[in-house]
Image (cartoon, helix red, strand yellow):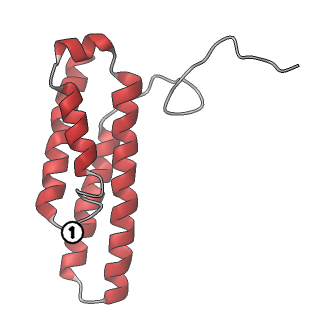
């Protein structure tokens, strides 16, 4: 005989704390950009390999932070009020993926990612008023 949960909760951590902030994604995206810049400035192949590895890890963290906001924080009424919100998240997570910052060392892609996160943040803070 097994037990079934009576309540199911979803949150970005094991405790539904209600703490959300797009700054987490932006900080990781800024780290991605810095890794790209350091990669470009170095001629040391070992250093460059480390920079790429860290950039890819941080790119994945950007996606995770964005997914949490997209799926846990924003509610149907937010998407109704901001009809471009789904597209912003889709664009931003793709910019942090294999076709984006994970797959390139082009700082312009990182700048585009940061700009998308800033657009999401603007909407996020508007919903907190």
As displayed, is residue 41 above or below residue 43? above
Query: Farthest residue in the bottom direction?
Result: 44
Circle 1 sits on which residue?
105
As displayed, is residue 7 above or below residue 61? above
As displayed, is residue 58 above or below residue 54? above
**Residue at 33% in and 64% down:** 55
Percent of width and height locating residue 86: 23, 28
Percent of width and height locating residue 13: 54, 33
Percent of width and height locating residue 115: 14, 44
Task: Quadrant for residue 47, please give it.
Answer: bottom left
Examine the rendering and report whether any part of residue 65 can be seen.
yes
**Residue at 33% in and 29% down:** 70
- Image quarter (top left, top right, bottom left or bottom right) of the C terminus: top left
Examine the rendering and report whether any part of residue 129 can be seen.
no
Percent of width and height locating residue 46: 37, 86
- Image quarter (top left, top right, bottom left or bottom right) of the N terminus: top right
SS under mark 1? loop
**Residue at 28% in and 44% down:** 93
Query: 14 or 84, which lies in front?
Result: 84
Task: Report the side of 60 relative to 82 (left or right).
Answer: right
Query: Farthest residue in the front direction?
Result: 1
Task: Quadrant for residue 92, please give it.
Answer: top left
Query: 94 or 57, which lies in front?
Result: 94
Query: How many discs mark residues in the rendered view?
Result: 1
Task: Report the side of 107 relative to 67 (left or right).
Answer: left
């Amino acid at each position: 005989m097994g037990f079934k949960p009576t309540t199911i909760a979803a949150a970005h951590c094991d405790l539904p704390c209600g703490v959300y902030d797009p700054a987490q994604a932006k900080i990781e995206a800024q780290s991605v950009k810095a890794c790209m810049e350091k990669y470009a400035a170095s001629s040391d192949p070992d250093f460059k390999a480390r920079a790429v590895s860290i950039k890819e890890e941080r790119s994945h963290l950007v996606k995770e932070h964005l997914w949490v906001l997209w799926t846990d924080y924003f509610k149907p009424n937010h998407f109704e009020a901001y009809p471009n919100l789904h597209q912003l998240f889709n664009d931003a997570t793709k910019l942090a993926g294999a076709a984006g910052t994970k797959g390139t060392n082009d700082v312009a892609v990182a700048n585009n990612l940061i700009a998308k996160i800033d657009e999401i943040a603007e909407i996020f803070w508007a919903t907190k008023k």
